[in-house]
Image (spheres, rainbow, N blue to C red):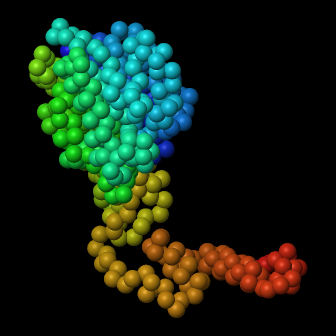
Amino acid sequence: MRILHTSDWHLGRSFHREGLLGHQAAFVDHLVETVRSDRVDLVVVAGDVYDRALPSVDAVAVADDALRRLAGLGVPVVLTAGNHDSARRLGFAADLICAAGIHLLTDPARVDRPVWVEDDHGPVAVYGLPYLEPDVLREPWGLPDRSHEAVAREAMRRVTAHRDGPGGGARTIVLAHTWVTGGQPSDSERDITVGGVSQVSADVFTGADYVALGHLHGRQRISDTVRYSGSPLPYSFSEANHTKGCWLVELGKDGVERVDFVAAPVPRRLARVRGTLEELLASPAHARHEDHWLQVTLTDTLRPRAAMERLRTRFPYALLLDFAPEGRAAATTQWADRLRGRSDRDIIRDFVEVVRDEPAGPDELALLDAACDACTGARVLEALPGEGGADRRRGTGAPEVLAS
């Protein structure tokens, strides 16, 4: 049996305000073509189909297109919910949809009810562990503590009891959306820490022939049979060096026989570049980055004016801009010490100079002073006691302060 393992589509997500639905639709095209050309027998999607609990209609349309086309190929799909999905919404009409070969395993109460598929060697049981929220499940499941380890162990206890029950002994595939110890995160996963405990030991899944993991966005091999497929697209600059795609798993009579990675198309590459503004604009070495989405770190001693606008004359897809001036000594004075005993007016003027690397000009100083006076006047009026103060807050007192 050939199994294609994918996860973390995050349909509807943007990348620093750049829409990704077109790129996500291109991945769906690639996925469907891979299923067809590589004669895949089963597709498993390990959670985070959508990027939010209430996805946009356009994101739902991309998911609908993917599942409809896979169903048209006659290939069963088993899909579970991630921490970004709404399990109830994603699992709507699951019992009806399964008639088309699309199996939505989103209910924690049904983790021990597998989808059954067959090959020449007999039946295969596919179990789905959606994202398991410890706070929600601790009481109904009678868990000893509030942790991801506890809910995962209880879920797998139920899976194992079913697998080893009457008529048991079938090969077992488990989908799980969780953070397994040893997996390396990126900057784009949502924090699922509960009381400081967010990870699950890999031995929780002992006994399964293959564990298709979701949640972490980089492809990873925890063991030969426990793997993350990662997201099909990069969702942070920390993933600039990732190779995105799916795992193609060959399941034989006695378990996994082979695993290959099928790389996904790259609609637009990511890169991080660093240097002075003039170097970046002039150096031929950066020509290859002109069509990349970029995170730029400028090392100019003084912050250049209109830096992003100038960068985009050469790099139209520059998205993030950071400043790390070289040759400037790090400040050793604490901010609390720098502010102590100083007036609001002086602090605001210093703030402008720190942000821009140059002091405010005369016209700007006049505006800043006027703003300071207005705020000071408002505080004075708020502090006035009794009805007189109330009258002044209504505008009948200290008009000269308000006017300034």
Q: Is residue 174 above or below residue 84?
A: above
| Left or right: residue 164 compared with residue 146 | left
Q: Is residue 206 above or below residue 322?
A: above
- Position of the C terminus, as image quadrant, is bottom right
Task: Give the residue at x 47% y 71%.
Answer: 355
- Position of the N terminus, as image quadrant, is top left
Q: Specify the quadrant of the image occupied by residue 290.
A: top left
Q: Specify the quadrant of the image occupied by residue 372.
A: bottom right
Q: Nearer the viewer, residue 92 or 318?
A: 92
Q: Nearer the viewer, residue 17 or 202?
A: 202
Task: Give the residue at x 41% y 52%.
Answer: 320
Counting from the top left corner in percent of width and height, residue 129 is at 34, 33
Counting from the top left corner in percent of width and height, residue 216 is at 30, 42
Instruction: Residue lying at the far bottom in this picture: please name it.
Output: 341
Q: Is residue 133 above or below residue 165?
A: below
Counting from the top left corner in percent of width and height, residue 201 is at 22, 45
Q: Nearer the viewer, residue 143 or 299?
A: 143
Q: Nearer the viewer, residue 249 or 292?
A: 249
Counting from the top left corner in percent of width and height, residue 197 is at 31, 54
Task: Give the residue at x 36% y 57%.
Answer: 195
Report the number of numbered marks.
0
Tell me, yes or no, if residue 70 can be seen here. yes
Tell me, yes or no, if residue 373 can be seen here. no
| Left or right: residue 56 compared with residue 300 | right
Q: Specify the quadrant of the image occupied by residue 109.
A: top left
